[in-house]
Image (cartoon, rainbow, N blue to C red):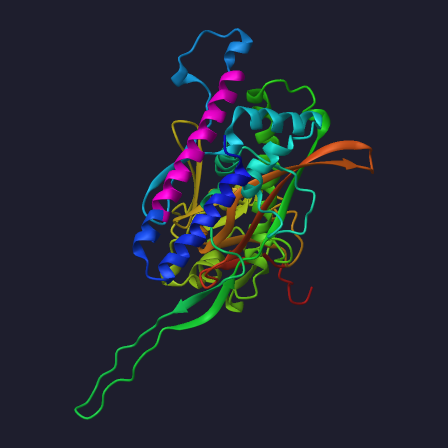
Amino acid sequence: MMTKEQYNAQRTKLLNDMRAAIDAGDIETSNRCRDEINQLDADYEAAAQARANLAALENSNRSYNMPDVTPAQTNAAPQMVTINNFGAQTAHTDPSETNEYRTAFMNFVCRGTEIPADLRASVAPMLNVAATTTTTDASAVIPTTITREIIREMKSYGNLYAKIRKLNVQGGVEFPILTLKPTANWIGESKSSDDQKLTANTKVSFSYYGLECKIAQTLLASVVTFDEFQQMFVPLAVEAIVAAKEKAIISGTGSGQFRGITKDSRVPTKNVVVLSPDEIGDYSAWHKKVIAKIPKAYRKGEFVMAQGTFDGYIDGMVDKNGQPIGRVNYGIDGGETYRFCGKPVETVEDDIIANFDAAAKDDVIAVYFNPSDYAENSNGQFAAVKWMDHDDNTVKTKVLHICDGKLLDPNGVIIIKKGETAKVVGS
């Protein structure tokens, strides 16, 4: 059976032969090399699938005296279909999804058992940490099943995170934010209007920032089965990752982490408003200072504030005619939906945006923006590293994730800060 090294060497040789034939105008030889490459890929993938099927059978439920299953029901690794440069489809196995690798990964995280070199080599291309971070001890790719679960749970638990735009673009590439504001001119018989150009006022580029979640080894030491491991490992990683991302969306410094909305210098100065304790619960103040600041083109945004701020000052607020403008709608499933001045309200924990009562002067107490104007850039890959915390002599596991986040369009953002109570003249 052909080894991976033999396969790579033979494929490289055929590609070089094909390139040389194309340069020489020898189409017949080029086509022959193409067919040989396609056949080589098919043979290697078939062999890889056979190995995966064997591993699945060896580790199937039969070893646990479970009811018999048909060959089609065995836990074989999922297949992905790719299209090569010539349009031919080839199926290949996700190396992180074989039973052999998943079991090895579980033992690595829970018990510190080193993952065998051949399994580590099979998933190495998926990790690609060296190109994106200075961390040198990243040592295990998280199986795709768990990665999908992490992302799904992040969207479930993190309401704010779930709403922002998700991108997968190359880091370091600048993306211009274009401005097109043409005007129509009246023209006379002898004069035509000037040409109008599309201009890029600002640019946004994404970096490679590492986000890690550390998990104490004692929490995972008693795990026995992969299902049990997945049920425990995912929530532990999710809670920390979601909290870190949502805090960074609002107040990230932009240095080694997301650049938060409230820290983005591109937000127009006129879009930063201050509400005093006398104004926070007053409709006219909100309408004049906040709602009136929202440009017409950006009226599809929503407010983000602490739960206590909404409950204490917004819920039940009425306009000058006595009509409610801040309310809670209750669904038949018991879910709560908040609205204020006709806009959705997303409530968050106090460590993301401070509650008005606990906030100090000039602290941000609410933000208005369209979540689709903020983007996270990530390839969706996660890696796990086992390490020794010498401060408390505890073995821990950390999950590494490479991502970045930035505000794409700052023009529709309104930042609301806490002011001080107006002083009474003569007091």
Q: Is residue 166 in the magenta section?
A: no
- The image quarter containing residue 106 is top right
Would residue 357 appear left or right of 390 to someone viewing this image? left
Q: Position of residue 67 (x, y in %)?
A: 46, 6
Residue drawn at point x = 45 percent, y = 66 percent: 176
Give the total number of marks visible in the rendering.
0
Q: Is residue 36 magenta?
A: yes
- In the rendered structure, the answer to whether residue 98 lies left or right of residue 352 reads left
Q: Is residue 220 visible?
A: yes
Is residue 81 among the parts visible in the rendering? no
The C terminus lies in quadrant: bottom right
233 left or right of 198?
A: right
Q: Residue furthest bottom?
A: 190
Q: Is residue 219 above or below residue 6?
A: above
Q: Position of residue 333 (x, y in %)?
A: 41, 27
Q: Nearer the viewer, residue 345 or 159?
A: 159
Above/below status of 51 relative to 242: above
Residues 228 and 190: in front is 228
Q: Is residue 235 left or right of residue 68?
A: right
Q: Nearer the viewer, residue 343 or 176?
A: 176
Q: Residue at x 66, y 47 (%)?
A: 358
Main SS type for the magenta part? helix
Residue at the extreme left: 189
94 lies above or below 174: above
Q: Position of residue 354 (x, y in %)?
A: 62, 48
The correct choice, above or below, for 61 with respect to 169 in the image is above
Span highlighted in magenta in the image: 33-58
